[in-house]
Image: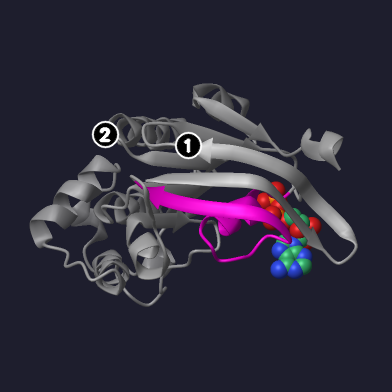
Amino acid sequence: MEIALQDVGQAYGERWLFRHITAQFRPGTITAVTGPNGSGKSTLLRICARLAAPVEGKVTVTEGERPLVKADYRERLALVTPELRFYPCLTAWENMSFLLGLRGQELSPACYSELLSRVGLQEARLRGVLAGSLSTGQRQRLKLAVLLASEAQGWLLDEPGANLDASGRALVMGEARKHAERGGLVLWATNDEREEAAANACIDLGRSEAGL
Ligand SMILES: Nc1ncnc2c1ncn2[C@@H]1O[C@H](COP(=O)(O)OP(=O)(O)O)[C@@H](O)[C@H]1O
Ligand SMILES: [Mg+2]
């Protein structure tokens, strides 16, 4: 799967957030989207996910030569954002089964167990615990578990290192790198220089003012 942006610009009201963004996101690469708060990182990810249409420019998603649209695209894509909330009165298992169910996937107990240990959460300690009583960092790790279970090829990650300790940030970066090595595509909105340095390419929206 490949996502191509051609001369993309977004504005709300009179104000341009960014303009003239031309980029290609290819399998096997991690691209960092950087810039200060309010520069449009989350907006750019939403445009790539086709949750928002840009005011100008074109977004093309292809697989081989074939354009990917609608359900086909959604199936191959996972967008993880700080806005994603778990149901606080459901357990980790229930939340994860529900979210994967929306993608038409079933979660087996063995897979759940393996994923939890992979993201550094202990299944035994989470049993019966409601998502609402998990720490912010634990919920962030649970989001990573859902992402890993999703089998999506395209990962759009909005500040995935936020609220995580050093080992959590290393874990997310390591999983993103493995995903890219398996031929996945990763777009990573971040403010962290180390995360930016670990990416293969970078789109700096803070500097895109040159194009305004
Ligand atoms: N749907 C919207 N309507 C109006 N303004 C928006 C909308 N979405 C984002 N914005 C504005 O666009 C700017 C960029 O937002 P965002 O993409 O969330 O930035 P970042 O993720 O870089 O912090 C903000 O000033 C925000 O208020
Ligand atoms: Mg943001």
Report the side of 14 relative to 168 (left or right): right
**Vertical comparison of 41 with 180: above or below:** below
In the image, is 90 to the left or to the right of 52? left
Residue depth check, mark 1 versus mark 2: number of the one nearer the observer: 2
Kindly indicate the quadrant of the structure image that contains residue 169.
top left
Q: Are marks 1 and 2 in contact (CB under 8 Å)?
A: no
For residue 101, above or below residue 39: below
Q: Disc number at residue 165?
A: 1
Let me know if residue 57 is in the magenta part: yes
Residue at 32% across / 69% down in the picture? 99
Question: Disc 2 designates what residue?
Answer: 182
At 55% across and 27% down in the image, what residue appears?
A: 201
The image position of residue 184, as x and y in percent, is 34, 39
Which amino acid does the dot numbered 2 rest on?
Arg
Ligand 1 is in which quadrant of the figure? Answer: bottom right
Residue 123: where, in percent of width, then height?
A: 20, 54
Query: What is the x, y in percent for residue 3?
Result: 48, 46
Q: Return the residue found at the far right.
A: 14
Amino acid type of the residue tagged 1 in the rendering: Asp
For disc 1, the neighbor class at 10 Å (few under 14, some 14 to 19, many from 20) is: few
Question: In the displayed image of the protein, which residue is found farthest to the bottom?
Answer: 89
Write down the region rendered in magenta.
40-63
In this view, the residue in front, 79 or 53, is 53
Q: Nearer the viewer, residue 183 or 144?
A: 183
